[in-house]
Amino acid sequence: MKKVLLSLSALLCLEGCAAPISVRQLSLTAAYQDRNESALAGNRLTNLTRTVLQRGNLLPLWQAHPAQALLELQHRTRRHFYTSTLEDQLFALAELNYFQGRRHRDRGAFMAAALYAYAYINPDGTADARPSPYDIHLRQACDLYMFGLTEALGTPVNLVSQQWRLSSGPVDISIDPAQLRWHGHDVTDIRPVSRLAVSGFENIYRQKGLGEPVGALPHLTKQENQSFQIANSLRVPMNLMLVMSTPRQQILSDHISASFQLTPIDETIVGEHAPLQFDQTTARAESLNDAMDWSVEYRGFLDGRLFNQGDRLQLLTIEPHQAGHRPVVLVHGTASSAARWANMVNDLMEDPVIRNHYEFWFFSYATGNPIPYSALQLRQALEKAVAQLGGAKADPALGKITLIGHSQGGLLAKMLVVNTGDRLWNGMVSVPLDRLKLRPADETLLRDALFPKPLPEARSVVFISTPQHGSYVAGLSVAQLVGRLVTFPVSVQEVVRAVFASSPETRKLNMRPWRVGSVYGMSPRSSFIRSLAAIPVAPGIDSHSIIPVLGNGPLKTADDGVVTYESAHVPDVQSELVVRHSGHSTQSNPVTTAEVRRILIEQLEKDGTVPPDTDTCGKGTVTSLGGSYTPLPKGEPQ
């Protein structure tokens, strides 16, 4: 008896030690994870869904036979047998179907998850009846809807009328063919982007809302492909919705009718209550990643014939031209490529004023070639594109081109905004061109390249890190040694030989082939760079300089690692911005991007396109983590 009492006493002590309710301290990370657990994040359900199952006495059945538990909850919900609110049960059905879809790779379960999530988010009636925007389950339901559609519809999305057979009954989905149009282009190859990770961009832009973010390819016209190359991989950021009228009424019925709704990022839907979700940076990344050949950076420097071969076009855009949109032509520097503008364009396109009034064209060229030859290719590419798009008469925006050049690209841009007369030629060759005995083709090439006039459509030019008076790096012997490795196009080789053979006086010139290339052309000792530096931008064309420098020292001795401040500084620009603590490749610097944005918006204000009150970044002195930048008074160095 004594042993029994002792055992009972020990048992009671053990029971007393285990409190039925306890509280413990969590770390901040663990506390956040505990409040955000869901089938979206792992294998645990939200507390809300577990509560719905527990109150309906379905939790043990879910743990043993999930499919049966899901069917039972679905049956009870449709019979209006509520152990919790209808809203909670719809959320639970969305999450449980998503869980099952992921576990069994069941597209039907993913479709059911999306439908239940849509009914949870959109009650029958007004938008005021929606779940509270402060409720975490609303955002989770939006993600269940998005990922449910992503997995149900697959890749690419086949947007045709279709029927689904779900456990709750048939689902008929229709599509209006007019939905598959974007600015007069049929769209195809619609692909979800929600499961893609992007690297290489400094900033990732996603517009939160409802729906599945996708990227679609517009079918381009023959004229668009001929005028300039629109990336074949162009992805227009779009939103895909599966919508149904009276969602909660339909979701409880034995038949559902729904429709697809495809919306581009630049179009709005009148009467749409919920904001739409887009993943614009990922769509742009896909366009640039597939369109840009990164290998051309060094091949394009060493092989001057690269863009003279096959169908490799030099002018590229990531969207078809839209009437009223002004071209911004971006010209990269030496041993570089158009993809180096990606971060700047990604940031600028997030500004609605920029996006609604400008479009970006990228020019690529063999950067080892003579600068006048590359500038002539730029001119010809732009003339062809503008003409085949109808010209400025058809669309006045085509007559308002902004040229932005980085490093050597700035020199190419300058060749399109100066009226050289014979000054450039006379600075390089002592014999007048018309006294040389040349073939007509050679004389035409030299006249077009070295006697340029302003491009009629050019309205402004922005020089970034541009060696206006030459680069000290280009003057180094090692740089000139590399410059000797460049292979020039046949036309360049022939015209150089022709000039030598045309007159005894030209044979005295030191015009060995490598000395006509871009590397020597950017040397401070080059007669080309010295002659071009003395020629101002033509009247009527606005010009701006953005000059990066390393450190905080005096500007007279400052440089960006490639170009000195004094070389990049020219006195006759409308504005000059010094970007402190920035190296030569400053295109991705937020200060540089802000200044480009300021210039573009200022142009719109100037001609009354936008009101002068539009916010403009870059005015005054701004201090950032990378240092400070100050727009300097015209022609006045610090």
Image (cartoon, grey):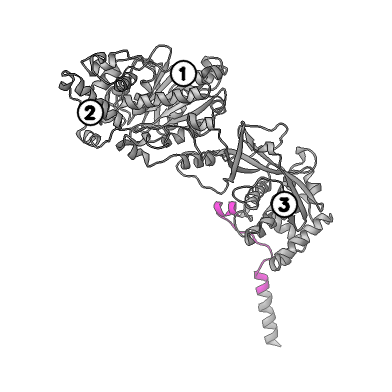
Position of 424 with respect to 623 (left or right) is: left
Q: Earlier in the sequence, mark 2 or mark 1?
A: 1
Would you say residue 407 is visible in this rendering?
A: no
Please report the residue visible at 64 percent of the width from the left and 50 percent of the height from the top: 153
Q: What's the mark number on residue 457?
A: 1
User: Type of residue at label 2?
Assistant: Arg
Determine whether, in the image, residue 517 is placed left or right of residue 28. Answer: left
Q: Which amino acid, by three-letter code, is at mark 3?
A: Phe
Picture quadrant where residue 167 is located: bottom right
Image quarter where the N terminus lies is bottom right
Horizontal placement of 10 versus 371: left or right? Answer: right
Q: What residue is rendered at 66% in x and 32% in y?
A: 268
Q: Quadrant of residue 122?
A: top right
**Amino acid bearing label 1:** Glu
Q: Position of residue 466 (x, y in %)?
A: 34, 26
Q: Which residue is mark 3?
A: 91
Residue 118's place in the image compared with 542, above or below, is below
Disc 1 crowd rating (10 Å Cα; few below 14, some 14-19, many 20+) is many
Earlier residue among tags 1 and 3: 3
> Reading the chain from its start, which is encountered first: label 3 or label 2?
3
As drawn, which residue projects farthest toward the top?
Answer: 539
Residue 446 seen in this snapshot: yes
- Which range of residues does the magenta coloring cover? 14-33
Residue 55: x and y in percent read 77, 60
The location of residue 435, given as percent across then percent down, is 23, 14
Does the CB distance between marks 3 and 2 fall below 8 Å? no
